[in-house]
Amino acid sequence: MWLNRDIVSISDLNVEEIMEVIDRANKMLPYSSSGHPEKPLSDKIVATLFYEPSTRTRLSFEAAAMRLGARVLGFGALEGTSVSKGETLSDTIRIVNGYSDAIVLRHPSEGAARLASEFADVPVINAGDGAGQHPTQTILDIFTIWKESGPVSGKGIGFVGDLKYGRTVHSLSKALSLFDISLYFISPEELKIPKHIKKDIEKRVPVKETKNLDEVIEDIDVLYVTRIQKERFPDLEEYKKVAGIYVIRPSLLSRGRKNLIVMHPLPRVDEIPSEVDNLPQAKYFKQASYGVPVRMAILDLILRGD
Ligand code: NCD
């Protein structure tokens, strides 16, 4: 069921499968800092092809592969590759398919991972396709909620910031709508969650949209903060209008629920000041650290299949 499976969209997984990854990630947790004693992927090569900047996603995938004994090849920037000579994505994928057992791909175009999966026999994992999806981030986000705040069901979960271009929001809100929760989307008019995603989610869970975070802060157990995705704006002037629009200050958090947690996929720009970092609500560094056990679980499942 898992062996050689592509992970392109979070919608490819049902709740049981998401929870299966989370359960396995929890078992991987002790090995995520010391290495798995059995090195179960010692005969495997994982390729990481990153056509867009990344720190956490690429490095945590590589750390995860190495902790399981696999070897890693790939690139984190395009200079030095044939992409800079004009090679197409499909040709690059056809070639790397012959050099590796799994391909982890980040690309600026929505749909790139789906396209790559059509040209590769080895499994393709989407590590972010433009403003599309980021399914492995979603699983580590759910893992974080589960570890740091308890069962997902029954919670009020708020997304704040760039809900239009933020792929982590698109994947995570879809996945969370499979649980018994309430969703709050907090953004300026220009950065609202895309209509087709909202329509789909609203079939399953209650949704409230607002510009005003103050209005809903008391209803929220998990506040998922996002960066305004400057690089996706067609016009820099449009970006300037909304840059810095939400800043999560300690005074706001003190009005929230007692067990409120603050998450962020990172990198942050100015939406969470550093004075929040030492508050008990701040979980974003912990969240980033969970990238390793969750990606260990995913690689183990698709490369060994049991
Ligand atoms: C996010 C991304 O690349 O979508 N980062 C990540 O993978 N942790 C969020 C962002 O860039 O704002």
Image (tube, grey):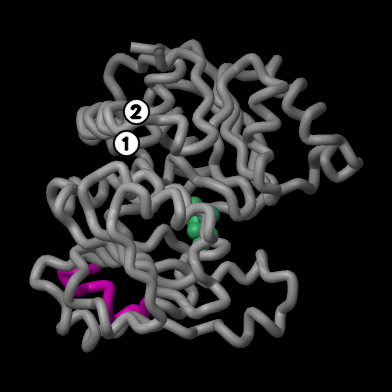
For label 2, the residue is: 297
Q: Is residue 169 above or below residue 220?
A: above
Q: Determine the secondary structure under disc 2.
A: helix
Q: Is residue 10 above or below residue 265?
A: above
- Give the residue at x 19% y 46%: 146
Considering the whole magenta stretch, tell me its main secondary structure.
loop
Three-letter amino acid code of the residue under disc 2 = Ala
| Quadrant including the N terminus | top left
Percent x, y for residue 252?
A: 24, 84
Asked if ligand 1 lies within 8 A of label 2, the reply is no
Asked if ligand 1 lies within 8 A of label 1, the reply is no
| Quadrant including the C terminus | top left
- Give the residue at x 28% y 59%: 206
For label 1, the residue is: 293
Q: Determine the secondary structure under disc 1.
A: helix
Percent x, y for residue 294?
A: 34, 36
Q: Nearer the viewer, residue 22 or 273?
A: 22
> What residue span does the magenta drawing correspond to?
272-283
Residue 279 visible at all? yes
User: Would you call the spot at circle 2 few (<14 residues within 10 Å), some (14-19), or many (20 or more)?
Assistant: many
Three-letter amino acid code of the residue under disc 1 = Pro
- Is residue 178 one of those drawn in magenta? no
Residue furthest toward the left?
A: 258
- Give the residue at x 45% y 36%: 11
Q: Are marks 2 and 1 in contact (CB under 8 Å)?
A: yes
Percent x, y for residue 127?
A: 54, 42
